Image: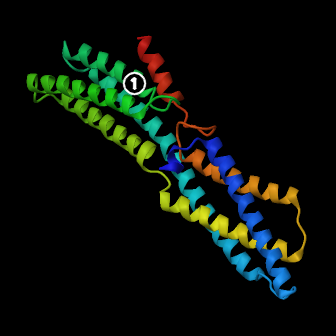
């Protein structure tokens, strides 16, 4: 969808352009009505207030949702790091050669997961590498389980490995699938266009126009919408999810 794939700068400039076009259309409509109705036509301030109030509500609702998901993504990075480190430690309880095989694969897995939140990395590429390593890890686990099916230590390792897989799925869902739905974006932009059209019409009827204020309004709404889009994209823009915890674990594993 356009709102998910368009660069943030395109979204910002496009929103400014849309606001300016809506205001200009409203001003021209207002001036035309003023000439035809001889000053008797006006736009209800209550209608403008209701439209802008609804827009403010939708913006607050969307911003709150995007910010909440951003916080969840940050928490999931820490949760995944902890689950991987726990699995690494419990892998040390396995008998050889399963201990070495498992730890080598976990080290490779951390290298891949550390790239998951990096800008420029394709989700399909990282996801494919992650799932391939998961399959290899599970194959080693099956061998270790068949070798000593009644071992408590093997059971603990299997439990922590399952947790790694579960957290991975959560990160995939929140990073790529839990986003602001397209109908909400469309509703926001429709309300913004209608509101600006009504404000422009009222300005045209009053016969006064302030270009600096119009530009300030356009930039203000554009900034808010771009911030929402930035929060909704974990690997783009200026508001990113820190991968420091995973990177620190990566460094720790490679120094052991």
Q: Can residue 56 be seen from the camera position used here?
A: no
On screen, residue 28 versus residue 165, left or right, reads right
Q: Residues within 10 Å of mark 1 (few under 14, many from 20)?
A: some
Tell me which colouring the rendered structure shows.
rainbow
User: In the image, residue 151 lies at what x, y percent?
Assistant: 14, 28
Residue at 63% from the left image edge and 68% from the top image edge: 191
Residue at 41% from the left image edge and 28% from the top image edge: 113
User: In the image, residue 252 lies at what x, y percent?
Assistant: 46, 17
- In terms of depth relative to the viewer, which is nearer, 118 or 162? 118
Taking 173 as reference, is 139 above or below it? above
On screen, residue 44 versus residue 38, left or right, reads left
User: In the image, residue 186 lies at what x, y percent?
Assistant: 54, 61
Of the 4 image quadrants, the one containing the C terminus is top left
Q: Quadrant of residue 144?
A: top left
Residue at 19% from the left image edge and 32% from the top image edge: 155
Taking 131 as reference, is 191 above or below it? below
Residue at 50% from the left image edge and 22% from the top image edge: 248
Taking 10 as reference, is 222 above or below it? below
User: In the image, residue 47 lies at what x, y percent?
Assistant: 71, 80
Residue picked out by circle 1: 112
On screen, residue 181 versus residue 84, left or right, reads right
């Amino acid at each position: 969808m356009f709102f998910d794939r368009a660069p943030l700068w395109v979204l910002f400039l496009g929103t400014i352009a849309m606001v300016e076009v809506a205001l200009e259309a409203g001003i021209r409509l207002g001036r035309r009505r003023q000439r035809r109705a001889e000053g008797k036509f006006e736009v209800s301030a209550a209608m403008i207030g209701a439209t802008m109030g609804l827009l403010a509500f939708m913006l607050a609702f969307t911003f709150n949702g995007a910010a909440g998901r951003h916080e969840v993504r940050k928490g999931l990075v820490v949760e995944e790091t902890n689950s991987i480190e726990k699995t690494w430690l419990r892998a040390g309880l396995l008998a050889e050669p399963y201990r070495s095989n498992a730890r080598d694969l976990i080290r490779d897995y951390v290298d891949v997961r550390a790239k998951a939140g990096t800008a420029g990395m394709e989700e399909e590429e990282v996801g494919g590498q992650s799932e391939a390593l998961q399959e290899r890890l599970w194959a080693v686990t099956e061998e270790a389980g068949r070798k000593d099916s009644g071992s408590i230590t093997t059971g603990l390792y299997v439990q922590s490995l399952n947790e790694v897989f579960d957290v991975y799925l959560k990160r995939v869902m929140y990073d790529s699938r839990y986003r602001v739905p397209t109908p909400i974006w469309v509703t926001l932009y429709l309300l913004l266009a209608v509101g600006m059209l009504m404000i422009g019409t009222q300005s045209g009827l009053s016969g006064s126009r302030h270009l600096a204020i119009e530009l300030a309004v356009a930039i203000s709404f554009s900034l808010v919408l771009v911030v929402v889009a930035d929060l909704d994209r974990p690997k783009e823009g200026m508001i990113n999810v820190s991968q420091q915890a995973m990177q620190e674990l990566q460094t720790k594993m490679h120094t052991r």
